[in-house]
Structures are given as C-alpha cells and as structure tokens.
Image (cartoon, rainbow, N blue to C red):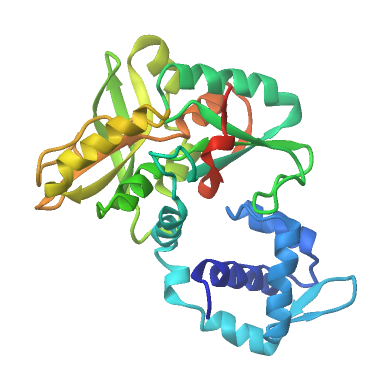
C-alpha cells in the first residue's frame, strides 16, 4: 500500500466495478465516484485504473471497460477497516495536512467544498452566494469557479459549473501548520438569535461516521440561512475543533491574522475544559466553533435552486480564488 488517499480511491473504484453486472469505462466510474463524494475527473480515474490493472485487481476488455478479477474481489474484501469506517475524519486529516496556506506569504492551498450548479442557474446561485458571504455567513468571500474539463482533480459533470468555497477546516490546517495540535470534533446546527450565536441545537461527531456531518444537515434541509441573515434569527451550520488550552493565546493571534486574509468566521474561543455553545470539550482543551463555508450554498438550496455539494472536497491555491 502507498498513499492512503490513493488507496482509498482504488478501493472505491473496485467497489463500483464489483457492483456492476457489466464492464465499466472511466467515464461511468467518474460519474459514480462523483455521486459518492469524490471530486475526481475522468483522466484521474484512468490513472487509478492502470494501477489496478498492474496489480491484477481489474481486467481491461478493450474499449468496453473493466471488470474486477478474483484477486481484486479478495483485495476488496480485505480492504482496510479504516477505509470502511471513520472515513470522514481520515479524509479530513489528509486534507488538513495538504492545506499549506502561509499567512506571511499569502500563498498556498486551502481546503474547499465543491458545489455543482446547473449552468442555467449559475447566475442566480452566485447572486445568493455573494449575498450570504457579504453578510458573514461563511468564513471567506473568495470562491473558485471550475468549468467542465478544466481541472484534473475536480470533476465537473456535463451541463454544470462547479463553485469552490473555502471550507472551515482550513482553520485546522492553519493551526496545525503553526504548531498547534488540532482535532475537528463536531459538525452542527447553530441557532442564531439577534444576529449572535445562541448555541448548537444538534451535533454530530466527525469520528466514527462515514458521512460528513455537515452533509447530513444539508440533506435534512435543516438550515434557515436567509432568515438568519434578514432577521437575525435562524439556523446556520458550524463546526467545532479542539486544541490544547495552553495554545489559546497563540490561536487567537493566528485567527486575527487570518481575518486580514479574508479568512474569518470563528464565533468564539471557549474556556479550558468547558462546553462551548453547548458543544462538549475535553479536559485540558478549548473549543473553537467556526461558521462553515457551505452556509452560502445552503442559502442557494433554500431559494429553491438544486445544487450538489461535496463538503471538505479538495485543496485549492487560495491566491487563485476571487471575490464574487
């Protein structure tokens, strides 16, 4: 086994091929990977398929596609438990490691969420996203716009345009890169009252779940972002990470500097070992809740525009992201 991120994609590709009753080509595999939350393009799928062929896990049938071999089925059955369980936190940890944005140089990668929008809806959707960002519902006003077949790592289906929003887990990367151990602990639904956070109404742990907690709340259509913006009262999405209590002052300094780079949105910094906005925190740690970047996209859905969102999806060079 090599890079865990590559291995996980290989396992998922084998699963997709194994579940099919006929050979599958790279395009169909890329479509299904996209449905399962992997932002990976057709060319990248071909690269992974060559690895599987070399290992004897798949067999190529000309231009028809691939089938899984008996050796591949055994490998699939023996796949790492960490790939089947606790996938979300593992993927988050990998992306935190890849997020190397430097607050001094203003260069480097941030973690992004990727949302696919119908081309016909794009202008209306971006108007709403800008409205939400202008009113502080997300952590950054910058976005990346990806057209079809323009990015090897981010797959965009036909007839769609993808918009990348800065993910709140970027904060975790900033903290880690500056020597502060950090662990994302919860994604949740935050009650806003009089334009201020009143507390979490619901929390889902990042550990031990195969679906991103924020995506669960999106599927439930639990938010009222536009109402919160317009009236000061509503439900927004936020998450919580914890760090050593001894790092509180340094963390506060970093968050202050980050805000000058259009990266903000942390709601407060908790006290050692105490709940923060009703989210439980371990002894010796402090909690930092942050508004998630997907709030702007949730607002689009509230307006009746259908989109498909993949939280904590990829990394992107921050200097290439622009304000709407």
Residue pictured at 65% horizontal, 73% vertical: 14
Q: Can residue 296 be spotted in the picture?
A: yes
Residue 244's x, y, as percent? Answer: 16, 51
| In the image, residue 173 above or below residue 225 | below
* Image side of residue 283 versus residue 87, left or right: left
Residue 242's x, y, as percent? Answer: 23, 48
> Quick one: 83 or 191, which is closer to the camera?
83
Count of numbered circles on the image: 0
Residue 44's x, y, as percent? Answer: 70, 61
Q: Can residue 266 be spotted in the picture?
A: no
Image quarter for residue 174?
top left
> Quick one: 307 or 247, which is closer to the camera?
247
Q: Identify the residue at the far right of this view.
A: 63
Residue pictured at 68% horizontal, 89% vertical: 70
Quadrant (top left, top right, bottom left, bottom right) of the C terminus: top right
| In the image, residue 292 above or below residue 16 | above
| In the image, residue 244 above or below residue 189 | below
Residue pictured at 73% horizontal, 37% vertical: 160
Residue 5's x, y, as percent? Answer: 52, 66
Q: Identify the residue at the far bottom of this view.
A: 71
* Image side of residue 276 versus residue 301, left or right: left
Residue pictured at 22% horizontal, 31% vertical: 268
Image quarter for residue 278?
top left
| In the image, residue 137 above or below residue 274 | above
Q: Identify the residue at the far top of this view.
A: 231
């Amino acid at each position: 086994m090599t890079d865990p991120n590559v291995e996980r994609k290989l396992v998922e590709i084998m699963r997709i091929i194994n579940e099919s009753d006929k050979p599958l080509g790279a395009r169909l595999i890329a479509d299904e990977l996209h449905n399962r939350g992997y932002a990976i393009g057709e060319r990248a799928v071909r690269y992974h398929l060559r690895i599987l062929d070399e290992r004897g896990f798949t067999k190529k049938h000309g231009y028809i596609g691939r089938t899984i071999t008996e050796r591949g089925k055994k490998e699939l059955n023996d796949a790492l438990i960490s790939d089947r369980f606790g996938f979300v936190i593992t993927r988050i940890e990998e992306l935190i490691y890849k997020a190397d944005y430097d607050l001094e140089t203003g260069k480097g990668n941030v973690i992004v969420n990727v949302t696919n929008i119908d081309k016909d809806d794009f202008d209306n959707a971006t108007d709403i996203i800008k409205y939400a960002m202008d009113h502080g519902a997300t952590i950054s006003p910058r976005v990346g716009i990806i057209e079809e077949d323009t990015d090897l790592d981010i797959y965009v289906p036909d007839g769609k345009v993808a918009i990348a929003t800065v993910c709140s887990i970027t904060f975790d990367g900033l903290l880690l890169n500056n020597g502060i151990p950090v662990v994302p602990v919860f994604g949740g639904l935050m009650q806003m009252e009089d334009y201020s956070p009143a507390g979490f109404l619901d929390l889902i742990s990042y550990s031990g779940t195969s679906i991103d907690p924020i995506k669960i709340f999106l599927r439930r259509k639990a938010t009222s972002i536009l109402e919160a913006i317009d009236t000061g009262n509503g439900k927004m999405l936020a998450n919580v990470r914890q760090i050593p209590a001894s790092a509180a002052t340094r963390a506060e300094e970093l968050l202050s500097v980050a805000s000058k780079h259009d990266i903000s949105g942390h709601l407060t910094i908790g006290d050692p070992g105490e709940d923060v906005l009703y989210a439980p925190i371990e002894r010796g740690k402090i909690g930092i809740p942050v508004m998630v970047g997907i709030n702007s996209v949730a607002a689009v859905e509230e307006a009746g525009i259908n989109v498909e969102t993949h939280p904590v999806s990829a990394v992107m060079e921050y200097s290439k992201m622009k304000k709407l």
